[in-house]
Image (cartoon, rainbow, N blue to C red):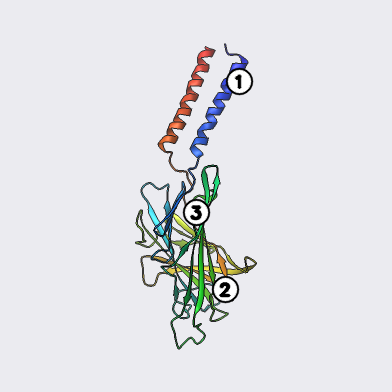
Amino acid sequence: MITTRKAMIITLALAALLASVPFVAAQSSGIEYQHANGVVSLTTDTIGVKVSAYNQVPHFHFWDENDTTPGADYHVLFSNIFEANDTNDNGVYDAGVDHRYGDPYTLPATDWDFSGFITEQDGDVITAVHFNFTNSETYAPPVTTVLADMPISMNLEIEIRVHINLTNSNQMKFDFSLEGWEWMYEDSLLVFQFTVAESEHGQNAGTSEPADFNQDSEGYRFEFGDAYMECAKYAFTGNGTHQVQMKASHGNTEQNQESKSVYLAFEYFGNETLDYDPTLGVLSTAANPLDITTMLLVGGSAAAVIVVAALIVKMRG
C-alpha cells in the first residue's frame, strides 16, 4: 500500500522528470564566433553568418542553420555611395529616373581595421557578440567639367558595427556610420547601394538573383528566398539627437544581372556623421533538430518517467 508520504515523493519525482524534458530540448548552445583571414564567422542555433571586408567590399554572407537540405546562402554587399537628384521629389531614389552626380564612391576592398570582439555571457553561454570594421581614406572624386560643385576630395570614415544576440537568434543588426561626406547640393539625396544575391550553400559569392525578391507595401522590408533585409525609417545624426528620413527602393544591378540592388536614400544632413542600422535575417525561427546527446537525455528522462509510473501501478496492485 502506498502511504501519503510515498505518494508525495513519487509525484514530486514525476514532476521533476517531466519538467526536465522541455528544459533539455530548449537549451541553446550559445553563439560560436571566430575571426580568421579577414572573415568573421558566427553561428547561433538558427543563423550562420560570415562578414568580410578583405579583398572585397563589405560582404554579409548568411544562411539558415535549420535548413538541412542544404538550402541557399544569401549575399548582401555594401557596394556604392553616391549623390543623386530627386526628380519627382518623393524622397526615393528611382533608378533610371533620378540622375547620379558624378561617379559613385565604391567602398574600399582593403584597409578595414577589425575591432576585436565584445561578448556578453550568461554563465558559460555566449549570448551576444559585437564587433566592427572601420576604414578611413581620402577620396578624390573623378574630375568633371559638368559638375562645378563637385568637391576636390573627401576625408571619409566608414564604420560597420555588427551585433548578434540570442534574443533574436535568427538575425543580425549592422549599424553603419559615415563621416566626412561633402555634399554637392542641399536638395539632393545620398544613396547607399547594396547588392543582393544567393548561391548554393557553402559558396563564398552570390551566383544568381535571389528567389522571390519583393519589397513590402510600406517600403522598409525586403524578402528574398528564406531571408530578409529590414530597414529603419530613420537614420540619426548629432549623436542620436536628430532624425534623418530614409526611403528605400530596389532595381536591377547595372553591370551584373545576377543580383538585385537595394537603394537606401537619405535626405540632406549637412556635415554631420550619419548613423543607420538595418537588419539581416532568416525567416526560420524554429529550434534545431535535437542532437544525439539531447535525444539521449530526453529519452532517458522519458524512460525514467515510464518506470516510475509502472512502479506506482505495481505497488497499487
Tell which residue pokes out farthest to the right in this image: 241
| Amino acid of disc 3 | Gln
State the image coordinates of residue 265 (x, y, percent, origin top left).
52, 71
Q: Measure how far apart labels 3 and 1 are at the Cα level.
A: 45 Å
Q: Earlier in the sequence, mark 2 or mark 1?
A: 1
Labels 2 & 1 near each other (Cβ < 8 A)? no
Which mark is first along the chain, 1 or 3?
1
Helix, strand or loop for disc 2 = loop
Q: In terms of depth relative to the viewer, which is nearer, 58 or 289? A: 58
First of labels 3, 2 by sequence position = 3
Residue 8, which numbered label?
1
* Distance Cα–Cα, label 2 vs label 1: 69 Å
Q: Residues within 10 Å of mark 2 (few under 14, many from 20)?
A: many
Position of the N terminus, as image quadrant, is: top right
Q: Position of residue 247 (x, y in %)?
A: 54, 68
Q: Would you place residue 36 above or below residue 149 in this image?
A: above
Which residue in the protein does label 2 denote?
A: 267
Q: Residue at x 49, y 37 (%)?
A: 25
Q: Residue at x 51, y 79 (%)?
A: 85
Q: Is residue 164 above or below residue 97?
A: above
- The picture places residue 47, in percent across and down from the top left corner, at 45, 51
Residue 36: numbered disc? none
**Residue 162: image location, x then y, percent:** 50, 58
Give the vertical position of 169 relative to 74 (above or below): above
* Element class at badge 3: strand
Q: Which residue is pictured at 54% across the width and 31% down the height?
A: 19
Tell me, yes or no, if residue 165 can be seen here.
no
Q: Which residue is mark 3?
A: 171
Q: Is residue 192 above or below residue 225?
A: below
Q: Amino acid at mark 2?
A: Glu
Q: Label 1 sits on what residue type?
A: Met
